[in-house]
Amino acid sequence: MKSTVETHKAVNRRSAALAANSTVSRFSPSELHNAWGLACSFDIYNCNPATIRDAEKIKQFVIELCELIEMKRFGETLVVDFGEDERVAGYSMVQLIETSLISAHFANQSNATYLDVFSCKPYDPRVVEEFATEFFGGSECITQINLRR
C-alpha cells in the first residue's frame, strides 16, 4: 500500500502532466489539482458494427482501458443489450472503478459509441479518445471535458 506522501506525489505528477495536455489546457494546473474529478464524454461515430454488438469485445475494451489509464476495476463489467426503439437499441455498459465509474451506450442504428469516464484520479482524456476510437473502429470522436468540483 502506498503512503499518503507517495499518493500525493503521484497525484501531483498526474495533475502536472494533465495540465500540459492540450485537450485540458483551458484549465489551470491549480484547477486540475483542486478538482474533485474529471468527467469526460466521448462520442465516437462510424464504429465497427461487429465490435459494438459483441458483449465480450466490450468487456475486453473495459479491461484494456482500465489497465491503460491505471484505473482499478471494482466488480465485473455489466453489459446489457436492450432498447425497444431501434434508434437507441444496443448494448449499454457499466464498470465501477475504485475512483468512480466508466459507462457507455452503443447505438446499433447509427453505429455510434457514447462513452463516459468519471474519476477523481487524474487521467489523460486524449489517451482514452485515441484508444476507444481505435478499439471500436470509429472514424470521428467528439470529446467533452468537464472538471467536477
Image (spheres, rainbow, N blue to C red):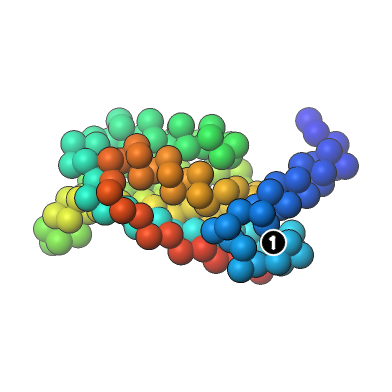
In the picture, residue 116 is in which quadrant?
bottom left
Where residue 147 sits in the image (x, y, percent)?
Answer: 60, 65
Q: Residue at x 31, y 53 (%)?
A: 140
Work out which residue is located at the far right of the displayed protein and give it.
5
Q: Position of residue 9 (x, y in %)?
A: 82, 44
Is label 1 in a helix, a strand or a loop?
helix
- 98 relative to 145 in the view: left or right: right
Q: Quadrant of the N terminus?
A: top right
Q: Which residue is mark 1?
A: 32
Residue 50's quadrant in the figure? Answer: top left
Locate residue 100 relative to residue 143 in the image: left or right: right
The x and y percentages for residue 67 are: 54, 32
Q: Residues within 10 Å of mark 1 (few under 14, many from 20)?
A: many
Q: Quadrant of the C terminus?
A: bottom right
Give above or below for 70 relative to 24. above
Judge whether 111 appears above or below 69 on screen: below
**Residue 94 seen in the current view:** yes
Q: Is residue 133 above or below residue 3?
A: below
Residue type at numbered disc 1: Leu
Asked whether the viewer can see residue 105, the reply is: no
| Residue 93 drawn at (x, y percent) | 36, 46
Q: Is residue 108 left or right of residue 12?
A: left
Residue found at x 58% / y 57%: 22
Residue at 15% x, 61% y is 87
